[in-house]
Each structure stands twice: as structure tokens, then as C-alpha cells.
Amino acid sequence: MDLELPLELQAYLGELDAFIEAEIKPLEEADDNIRFFDHRREDARTDWDRGGLPSREWEALLGEARRRADAAGHLRYPFPQAYGGKDGTNLGMAVIREHLARKGLGLHCDLQNEHAIVGNNVGLLLMLEYGSEAQQADWIEDLATGRRHFAFGITEPKHGSDATWMETAVSGTATGG
């Protein structure tokens, strides 16, 4: 069994590190943005006047990091080339996420809210595989850039969140929105 990482993946980790040092670290350190990652982070990230939603400043900072990562070709790594990606592999994503997480909390990667400069956008991959043409036209670019997200709920009475016990069925076609 060969446990060595492919050379192109090793090189890509070096490219990510250079991008983090050149683009992401300076952004993290500007304008006291470090408050979102140090002992003040929960308060800085939270807009108490909006019922505890993420603060607009925090969301804007994450958006700028995503924008820079997208412009540099990193955000869409796992996506097909046709959608601006690098046809990244599951192995690549696992190695990249481990690499970024190992660097510690920062604007490059925050597992608490699934933010990373290399997008782990399973929703987009599902949309590419299972979405209708109309859904794909409506959703793909916004999912790719992080402007839109989708989620699902699986809690049912008497079953909690164990999806193997789901009894609810939906008829018709979901349209998103």
C-alpha cells in the first residue's frame, strides 16, 4: 500500500500556504479582525441586537476571504473544471482540510462554522449530480461563491435526528429558493 501523498497534492498544499501568507493572514490581521479568532471571538462574531445572529462584520470578513480564495482558484477546488474547479478528489479534500485545520483557528479555516478557503460545498456537488437543469441554473453559481446555502432538517416526532427512522415523505418536486 502506497501511503505517500501524490506530488501534485503536496505541491498544492505549498500553493495554499503561500496564498494564506500573502492574502489571508494580512486580512486576518487588519482592522482588529483578529478579534474574530481570539478570546473575544464569540462576542465579536455575534450580533446581540439581532437575536444572536452572526454579525454583519463577521459575515463580510468571511465573504472577503471566500472572494479572494475564489479569485485565486482555491475555493472551488473540489468542483468540476466546468464550474471553475480543479476536479479535486475526496483524498485531496481530506488532506487539505487536515492541513488547514492543523494550522489552527484562523481566517484560512474555521471548522466551527465550516468556513475554509477551500470550499467543502457538498451541496453544490449534490446539485450537480441530482439537480434539474432549472435548479442548477438557479443555484450553482450562488452555491459556488457562498452567496446561498441550503440545509435540511431531519428531526421528527418520536425519532429525533436519526435519519434511518424517517417516516415523513414529500410529494412533488422541490424548487429551491
Image (cartoon, helix red, strand yellow):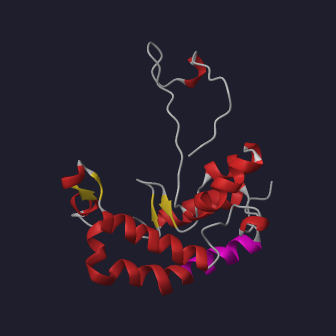
User: Does residue 95 appear in this view?
Assistant: yes
Residue 73, image x, y percentages: 65, 76
Q: Name the residue located 58 percent from the left edge and 15 percent from the top edge.
A: 167
Q: Left or right: where does residue 43 sit relative to residue 34?
A: left
Q: Which residues are magenta?
A: 7-17
Looking at the image, the residue that sits furthest to the left is 49
Q: Nearer the viewer, residue 122 or 147?
A: 147
Residue 144, image x, y percentages: 61, 62
Give yes or no for residue 8 being in the magenta stretch.
yes
Residue 133, image x, y percentages: 77, 49
Q: Quadrant of residue 26?
A: bottom left
Q: Quadrant of residue 95?
A: bottom right
Determine whether 18 is above or below 122 in the image: below
Give yes or no for residue 89 being in the magenta stretch.
no
User: Does residue 106 appear in this view?
Assistant: no
Q: Nearer the viewer, residue 74 or 58?
A: 58
Q: Nearer the viewer, residue 11 or 90?
A: 90
Count of numbered circles on the image: 0
Residue 147, image x, y percentages: 52, 61
Looking at the image, the residue that sits furthest to the bottom is 22
Q: Name the residue located 42 percent from the left edge and 80 percent from the top edge.
A: 25
Q: Main secondary structure of the magenta part?
A: helix
Q: Left or right: where does residue 86 sit relative to residue 23?
A: right
Q: Name the residue located 52 percent from the left edge and 23 percent from the top edge.
A: 162
Q: Name the residue located 55 percent from the left edge and 60 percent from the top edge.
A: 98
Looking at the image, the residue that sits furthest to the top is 158
Q: Left or right: where does residue 38 sit relative to residue 99?
A: left
